[in-house]
Image (tube, rainbow, N blue to C red):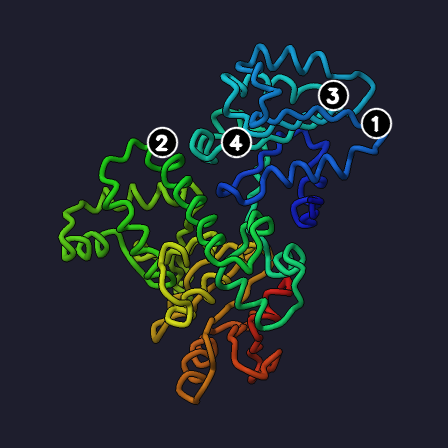
Amino acid sequence: MNIISRQEYAKCIDDWLGKEQIIVLVGQRRIGKSFVMKDFIARHKDDPRANIIYIDKEKKAFNFIQNHEQLNTYLDEHFLKDYHNYILIDEIQDIEGWERSVRSFRTEEDTDIIITGSNSKMLSGELSTLLGGRYKEIYIQGLSYLEFLEFHELKDDDNSLWLYLTYGGLPGLRNIGLDHEEMVNDYLSGVFNTIMLKDIIERHTIRNISFLRNLISFMSDTVGKLNSANSIAKYMKSQGQEVSTNVVLSYMSYFHEAYLTCSVGRYDIHGKRLLESNDKCYFTDVGLRNFVAGGERDKDIEKVIENVVYQHLMRMGYDIKVGQLRAGEIDFVCTKPWKKIYVQVAYIISGEETRKREFGNLRLIPDDYPKFVISTSPLISRSDDQGITHLHLREFLKMDL
């Protein structure tokens, strides 16, 4: 099967070449890090000055490279002077002391290094120590809506949007086919259970597995709702599970470290300050969220839509917070250098009460930054309501605001 280039990541990697930084691809398991690396090879292999050294530790052909000394020997044998050497190592954590080799070869002229590693043994919080701060971390997300259409050869219509909202954006679903619901569910189950086992349970020696699974189930059911560790601990106690607030905080951090979930804090729009506690949780892939939550999507569609909007805002590079007003809440306050937008999310704007709630809160914000309402209201593509832009979800997912 041909590799489909994910242009956003291809450009980001290419922009960082020659900057004397180790490029580290990070993200949830099965999110496509290895294929982004293989796409790099396909795009650069015909460059006459390129010498690509590719090591895939999932292949038995590279079993002999077990430590940094053996890695040094292999790289020295394949390193070519007077060429631009690209060192690509997939699943690098399986090489003992790999960071010594990587730090050393980074100092060679005309050399770029791109690596990936398992979340269970090489998380982003540890990279600064391992690599001495000389690295660029590129966060790989699931497929965007437009990528989803390309990968699955679908046309842009409401049915395709529904498939995206239901199954999410794991690239490996391309091999399964979206027509086989049971097989898709089995695939999502395999990915989820591997993350839970390898990246969380084994890494952190979790013994209270029952609570761990109940907690992730609770988080899937409360996507987009404000929760604190203390309130979660109280809820779990009411369900017969006695756990401390610190345990809840620890377990939630394990989900975040494994890129399974993300936490979004609150921002006081009037006071222009961050507020403590009561964050919102979103999943990095809505398909896995739906697998954990179970049930039918028509019963929790608002949560799914809000999760997908959050993912797309992340994809556009925004720093995202929940906006707190004295009289209400703004779903997302999104900032970049020299840019800010406000976003409200609704399933359908069906009446004056809903319109007043979603548009009215945005009108209470005392500045002139762009404001958007995202919904799946029928017959809406894009409209303007006294300076607030109303976008259909399908249109929003195709834009870069």
Report which residue position mark 1 lands on.
Answer: 49
Report which residue position mark 2 lands on.
Answer: 203
**Circle 4: is it few (<14), some (14-19), or many (20+) Cα within 10 Å?**
many
Q: Position of residue 284 (x, y in %)?
A: 47, 52
Q: How many marks?
A: 4
Q: Amino acid at mark 1?
A: Arg
Q: Residue at x 32, y 46 (%)?
A: 252
- Can residue 270 be seen here? The reply is no
Q: Position of residue 121 (x, y in %)?
A: 44, 29
* Image quarter in which the N terminus is found: top right
**Circle 1: is it few (<14), some (14-19), or many (20+) Cα within 10 Å?**
few
Q: Residue at x 29, y 41 (%)?
A: 250
The answer for how far apart the CA atoms under marks 3 and 2 are is 37 Å
Mark number, residue 109: 3
Front: mark 1 or 2: 2
* Helix, strand or loop under label 2: loop
Report which residue position mark 4 lands on.
Answer: 117
* Helix, strand or loop under label 3: loop
* Helix, strand or loop under label 1: loop
The answer for how far apart the CA atoms under marks 4 and 3 are is 24 Å
* Helix, strand or loop under label 4: loop
Q: Amino acid at mark 2?
A: Arg
Front: mark 3 or 2: 2
Q: Is label 2 in contact with label 4 (beta carbons under 8 Å)?
A: no
Q: Amino acid at mark 4?
A: Gly
Q: Is label 3 in contact with label 1 (beta carbons under 8 Å)?
A: no
Mark number, residue 103: none
Q: Is label 1 in contact with label 4 (beta carbons under 8 Å)?
A: no
* Among numbered discs 3 and 1, the one appearing first in the sequence: 1
